[in-house]
């Protein structure tokens, strides 16, 4: 009995059995193309959120957005790179988004700084509330254990404290921006 059922399932029943299957219905649908406005919205979405990579496939169309190309911790210098593939087209020139070059003089200066990095992923805040004064400003003297900022993660406010004494020489992140684990937050001149 089972063999008969299997052979009936495999045999095309006058063409109606294959046309009713969900997979063949999908293949028969026309491929929906994505517009430039939709691509721009996706780029903005990836830029404004904590995505590192985003990929979309629609039929033969594939879109991949990836953050990268710069030094870790310099999110304001990193632009998302865009890779668009259309498998129906034989060759398509790729367009790369250029990332600004880092001035070698600043790299040498920043290498002398003690870096305070984010211990968690979250949102960076320079003050305990929107109306309060900032914890620290450029040029402030700090002692080890002083609170430098707050990182909000899952509605919890985590105080980030200095692990060294010195002068705040660089603030790498703007208030209210997302931060990744290990991303530089402050540079302290010892």
Image (spheres, grey):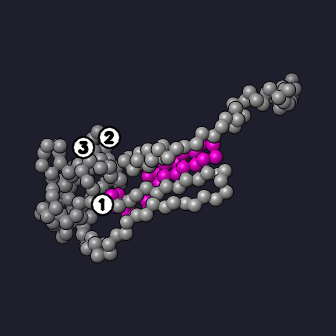
98 or 23, which is in the foreground? 98
Q: Which numbered disc covers residue 184?
A: 1
Which mark sits nearer the N-terminus, 3 or 1?
3
The residue beneath circle 3 is: 157
Q: Marks 3/1: CA distance?
A: 18 Å
The residue beneath circle 2 is: 154
Is residue 39 one of those drawn in magenta?
no
Above or below: residue 150 compared with residue 168: above
Above or below: residue 76 compared with residue 6: below
Q: Marks 2/1: CA distance?
A: 20 Å
Quarter assignment of residue 170: bottom left
Q: Which numbered disc covers residue 165?
A: none
Q: Where's residue 180, x and y in %?
A: 35, 53
Q: Are marks 2 and 1 in contact (CB under 8 Å)?
A: no
Is residue 53 one of those drawn in magenta?
yes
Above or below: residue 1 compared with residue 37: above
Which mark sits nearer the N-terminus, 2 or 1?
2
Residue at 39% from the left image edge and 50% from the top image edge: 47
């Amino acid at each position: 009995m089972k063999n008969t059922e299997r052979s009936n399932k495999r045999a095309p029943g006058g063409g109606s059995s294959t046309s009713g299957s969900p997979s063949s219905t999908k293949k028969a649908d026309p491929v929906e193309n994505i517009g430039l406005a939709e691509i721009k919205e996706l780029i903005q979405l990836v830029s404004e959120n904590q995505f590192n990579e985003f990929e979309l496939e629609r039929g033969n169309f594939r879109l991949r957005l990836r953050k990268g190309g710069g030094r870790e911790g310099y999110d304001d210098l990193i632009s998302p790179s865009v890779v668009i593939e259309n498998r129906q087209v034989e060759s398509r020139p790729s367009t790369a988004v250029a990332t600004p070059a880092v001035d070698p003089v600043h790299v040498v200066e920043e290498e002398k700084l003690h870096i305070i990095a984010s211990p968690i992923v979250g949102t960076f805040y320079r003050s305990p509330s929107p109306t309060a004064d900032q914890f620290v400003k450029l040029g402030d003297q700090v002692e080890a254990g002083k609170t430098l900022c707050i990182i909000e993660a899952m509605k919890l406010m985590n105080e980030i404290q200095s692990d060294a004494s010195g002068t705040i020489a660089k603030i790498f992140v703007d208030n209210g921006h997302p931060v990744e684990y290990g991303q530089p937050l402050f540079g302290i001149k010892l």
